Amino acid sequence: PEAARDLELLAAPFHGETVGVIKDRRARSYTAVLAVRVTSFGLLDRAEQESRQAGWGGVLSGLAREGSPVSRIQWVERTVPADGDEIGRYLGEAWTRDTVAVDSLAMQAYLELTSSAPAATKDHELFVCLQIDAKRAWRQIKRAGGKQGADAGACGVLLRELEALGEHLTAADVRVVGALRPGMLAGAVRVAFDPWSRPGLARLAAADPDRDGIDEAAAWPVAADTSWSVYRTDGAVHATYWIASWPRIDVGAAFLSPLLLNAQMVRAIAVTIEATSPLKAIREVEAARTSDVADRELRGRMGFMETARRRRQTEAVVRREEELADGHAAVRFAGYVTVSARSLEELERNCSEIEHAAQMARLELLRLHGQQEQAFTYTLPLCRGLR
């Protein structure tokens, strides 16, 4: 696809293993991906939720240190068609033929249930992606690469940061499954373009346990077509939304639950975050505070009344200053939601459901008309979506 033309999948050696790294030649960035798992956030009590939230804040603060080569971090949470063969494999291992006949009513009912399960169930996948900017980290890259070149140096710097990120996530009670190898990373991208290819990929993996995912060439769709409001790739159609407005009132740590717990459709939610170094963040908030004071004095001399909007802006600046003083990182971020289906009719039904779920989460979704192909890549593990 045009939006992925500048991407290249690299195989980077690290601690005796090979890790997949996506190089963006135009942006001069390198991205690696961790597969992670978390306990059901909605089932935790409020104190534990806030503790996990503070742990994630600590992870972001670690990335905002002075001189960090990391430019962005992204999390992607998606639902994909369940691997029906997993149920079949379990049946084959657990079935005791001596006591349960294949033609018994119980077995027939179970077989009927397992045959319909893949279509009705979805699996959740969660990725944390880390990106370095070659322009920002050129000194570290040059030292790490030596005679091996820029790509080797960039991968070395990135994977060291990825290893540290994994340790910080573990300390924050996030289970790190591991870094995606090249074939697994290609497979993750492939499933995003065509979610219903996942059962077939799972069967290939079951037939050949030594198989490392898929080749890079197979990661991309065979055919793609974009229209004003829909992006079509192979056997799937997609619609991508920008989270245009986040909650304007105080909400709990689990405010995204209506979106994240909706597993009746195939969808992906991604948030890309860029941390600001402490010195830069302090300069920005001090400049904003000075500008706010000067503006308030000028408006007072001119006889203008202070509006509720101006008061909230002032309070927001003061709150940012207090958060920086407490050690929190200053970040900018953007969120996106991609809904996928097998037909246009199903897609529109799913879009209506996701819009309703977003309202329950106090989010405003804006469908990105006229830029669906580019917007679709914002929910891929590429750390895209920030301008």
Image (spheres, rainbow, N blue to C red):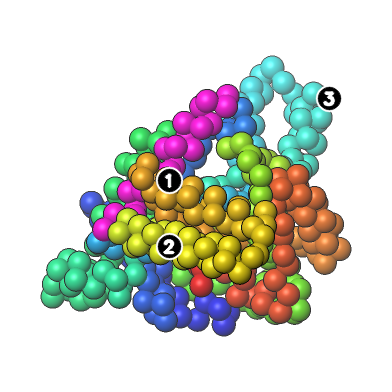
Element assignment for label 2:
helix
Do tag 3 and tag 2 residues touch (Cβ < 8 Å)? no
Question: Quick one: 209 or 364, which is closer to the camera?
Answer: 364
Q: Residues within 10 Å of mark 3 (few under 14, many from 20)?
A: few
- Tell me the tag on residue 246: none
Give percent across and percent down for residue 9: 40, 70
Residue 95 vs 283, above or below: the answer is above
Pointer 2 local density, CA inside 10 Å: few below 14, some 14–19, many at least 20: few
Q: Quadrant of the N terminus?
A: bottom right
Looking at the rendered structure, the secondary structure element under dot 3 is: helix
Which circle marks residue 323 in the picture? Answer: 1
Q: Label 3: which residue? A: 105
Kindly report the secondary structure that dominates the magenta region of the rendered protein: helix
Specify which label sits upstream in the sequence, 1 or 3: 3
Closer mark to the observer between disc 3 and disc 2 = 2
> Can residue 42 be seen from the camera position used here?
yes
Residue at image point 39% right, 59% down: 286
Q: Which residue is mark 2?
A: 290
Instruction: State which region is magenta.
Output: 45-66
- Front one among 361 and 90: 361
The residue depicted at 76 percent of the width and 79 percent of the height is: 228
| Amino acid beneath label 3 | Leu
- Report helix, strand or loop for mark 1: helix
| Relative image position of residue 27 (x, y in whole percent) | 41, 77
Instruction: Give amino acid for label 2.
Output: Thr
Q: CA distance from mark 3 to mark 2?
A: 78 Å
